[in-house]
Image (cartoon, rainbow, N blue to C red):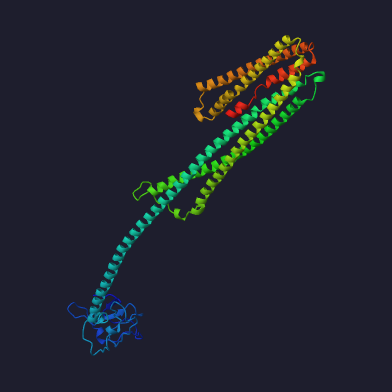
Amino acid sequence: MEYLGHTNTATYTSGPRIGGSNYQSFLPSIGSAQNFRTTDSFPAPSPVRRSMTTLPWKPSTHYQTARVNPSTALTSSMPDPMSLRNQLGEMDVSTTPSVFAAARNSLYTRYTPNDWMNSNQSNYLASDRVRTAAERLRLDTVRLCQETDDKTKRTQSDVGKRLGHRVGDIHFWKTELQNETDQMLTEIHSLNESKRVLEKVLQETENPLKVAQECLYHREKRQAIDLVHDHVEKELIREVDVIKKCQQKMRQTIEKANVQLSLNRAAQHELEKDTGDKFTAHNLDSACHQLRNSSRGIAYRNGVNHIDNTVSVPETWANFSNNNIQRSQSERAASKQMRNEIESVLNQCSNEMWQEWNAVNFNFTQRIQESSEARNRLQNHLSKVLQEIFDMEKNIELLKKSIQDKEAPMQVAQTRLDTRLRRPNVELCRDPVQHRLVEEVSEITSTVDALQAKLRLAENALQQLLRTKSTLEQDLSVKNNSIYIDRESCMGMRKTFPMSSRMISA
């Protein structure tokens, strides 16, 4: 039987060594070894032990006194065979019991009762210590799980509240931006309308300017002594200067209005861009606010908490929208001031032109009264020609007005065609509307060409009437010529102010 922790031993029977007389044995001499016979009934001789750890092989046939010296710590939790408590006393060959070789060898490896009791006690203590540590770990684990669950719920609730506040802030600023955008759109429309009125009035100032220039042109037809630089001519020249001055002022005001409109549209663009960003952010934060642990679409996004692409803080975020609103408000105030300036320019120019128009008419009246003595002969024939000239001029004005009235329908039709060019992809259909719009443009073009041709014929007819009038004027006196120019040609065009009623209605 072998014991754990000890060296395996080999047991051999002793016998004579074969050799010469000079052979020196390492074993003690035993005389009876030569006559030894191995039989089954004869008791086994004393065994010769050879240790595997000793070199060379040496038999251990005698007991020797030994002392065990401990080489490990005395505080080990397990019994140690090398401990001082397990140390065997002095051993003597005479006191050693006569036992078999295996029993004698096991004396060095057996434990004492104290070792057995200490081993059991150590196992008990180790079991208690391990169970106590495991129970403490289990309780700490339950407590930690509860604490982390409560902390996670509190954190998630706090984040939800903050998201709710954030959604409310975004909704507030989005509402403010939308209100300001609506007001800005209204202001842009009002300024556009005022500018449109001013442009219309500027275009209509061509009529009194044309009348004044036409009057100067007709008065240049005076002959001989009637070519006088009188008060009528002075007032007509002054009227032309006043109209051109008013036109220049209107053009400058229109340019300023265009600049203000650009600023208004820039502010509107910033408001709409900010509103769009607020709308997107509101939708995203609302979606985040509505997310729950059971919501669909939630998943791990590893590393997203390390990404920081923010460009503002709450203060700068609020200031950005506030600055956009303040800029829009200042532009609206400037736009309102621009509309007041447009109205002031309209009133001022209207009054100046109206006063100068009345002054010219008054001087015309005085001049006609002074020349009224010269209408005696050829008055009937001359009056018919002059009436026809007057009618033809009205006809020309009617034709010009008709041609001018075709501009708006032509612009509408061409704008519709241009707008429909932006239809995407297959929506670019050549439908009946497209055919009719093309036909409408062609019809208006042909109509305008016909009116232009008729206008040229009318102007040619007027020139023929003027040549006929010139032939008749050869027989008229200088005074009749002057009365004709002042009363019929000039005053015939200046009976009514050609833009007063339109300016009031505009």
Q: Position of residue 80 (x, y in %)?
A: 29, 79
Can residue 311 be seen here? The reply is no
- Number of marks: 0
197 and 297: which is toward the camera: 197
In the image, 281: left or right of 102?
right
Write the residue at 26% across / 81% down: 105
21 and 364: which is toward the camera: 364
306 and 172: which is toward the camera: 172
- Compared to 286, does 365 lie above or below? above
- Compared to 257, does 8 lie above or below? below
In the image, 392: left or right of 83?
right
Instruction: Write down the quadrant of residue 461 in the picture.
Output: top right
Can residue 103 be seen here? The reply is yes
Q: Position of residue 429 (x, y in %)?
A: 50, 25
Q: Position of residue 337 (x, y in %)?
A: 59, 40
Q: Residue furthest left?
A: 41
In the image, 300: left or right of 370?
left
Quadrant of image for the C terminus:
top right
Q: Residue furthest right?
A: 224
376 and 181: which is toward the camera: 376
Instruction: Write down the quadrant of residue 342 in the picture.
Output: top right
Quadrant of image for the N terminus:
bottom left
Write the residue at 76% across / 27% down: 234
Write the residue at 32% across / 80% down: 75
